[in-house]
């Protein structure tokens, strides 16, 4: 179960989950279905598929030992590339005339990855928890700013529970200690929440 949670809630998938939630539970759910699907697929390609291909190339050249990049010293370059992909995704959303707060979600995700890249130079932080922390922040801000299509309190509670389960899974798999898990979720939540709140 712990392994399943870690795979299903991979950091590579978090921006896609965030875009999906934005397009289906916020006021943007009023957009045509085809438009929402197109935006979701493009963002998934930029923030998930391309970074995964990049990781595969790094693994081929033995620059990372696995696609999960569990070794702290190997994380800096993948994190920088992921941040670049998030910047491209943010520009794509801006180009599509998305609301500023939606664009800022992706910018906040980019900032999260840059912060993790710097932290990873000296200390291992949980990318899984940073990712889910960002999604929790997204749902919270959509709810707090009155941008939801319906009451999101129940969804926020479910997401927090999922975050707790994911943190427990990372601990059970012995990928991180308690402080690394807590630091990850705090970094993800704060970076996304503040960016959306202050710049959105």
Image (tube, rainbow, N blue to C red):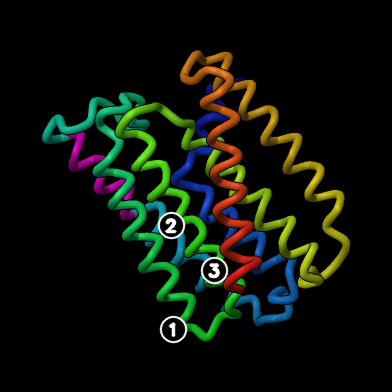
Q: What residue is disc 1 on?
A: 95
The residue that appears at 26% across and 28% down in the rendered structure is 73
Looking at the image, can residue 11 be seen?
yes
> Does the magenta-highlighted stretch encompass residue 53?
yes
Residue 87 placement (x, y as % from top left):
38, 65
Q: Nearer the viewer, residue 29 or 179?
A: 179
Q: Circle 2 — which element?
A: helix
As drawn, is 153 to the left or to the right of 26? right
Q: Earlier in the sequence, mark 1 or mark 3?
A: 1
Determine the main secondary structure of the stretch shown in magenta.
helix
**Magenta stretch bounds:** 50-59
The residue that appears at 60% across and 50% down in the rendered structure is 190
Label 2 crowd (10 A; few <14 / some 14-19 / many >=20): many
Q: What residue is disc 2 on?
A: 110
Label 1 to label 3: alpha-carbon separation: 13 Å
Q: Nearer the viewer, residue 118 or 48?
A: 118
Q: Earlier in the sequence, mark 2 or mark 3?
A: 3
Q: Nearer the viewer, residue 92 or 40?
A: 92
């Amino acid at each position: 179960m712990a392994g399943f949670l870690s795979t299903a809630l991979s950091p590579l998938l978090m921006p896609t989950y965030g875009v999906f939630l934005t397009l289906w539970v916020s006021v943007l759910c009023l957009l045509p279905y085809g438009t929402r699907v197109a935006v979701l697929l493009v963002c998934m390609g930029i923030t998930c598929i391309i970074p995964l291909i990049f990781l595969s190339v790094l693994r081929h050249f033995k620059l990372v030992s696995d696609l999960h990049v569990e070794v702290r010293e190997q994380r800096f370059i993948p994190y920088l590339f992921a941040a670049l992909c998030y910047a491209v995704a943010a520009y794509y959303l801006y180009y599509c005339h998305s609301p500023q707060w939606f664009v800022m979600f992706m910018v906040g995700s980019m900032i999260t990855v840059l912060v993790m890249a710097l932290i990873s130079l000296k200390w291992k932080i949980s990318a899984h928890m940073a990712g889910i922390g960002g999604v929790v922040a997204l749902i919270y801000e959509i709810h707090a700013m009155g941008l939801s299509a319906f009451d999101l309190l129940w969804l926020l509670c479910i997401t927090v529970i999922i975050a707790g389960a994911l943190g427990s899974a990372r601990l059970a798999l012995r990928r991180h200690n308690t402080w690394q898990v807590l630091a990850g979720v705090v970094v993800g939540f704060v970076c996304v929440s503040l960016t959306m709140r202050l710049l959105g």
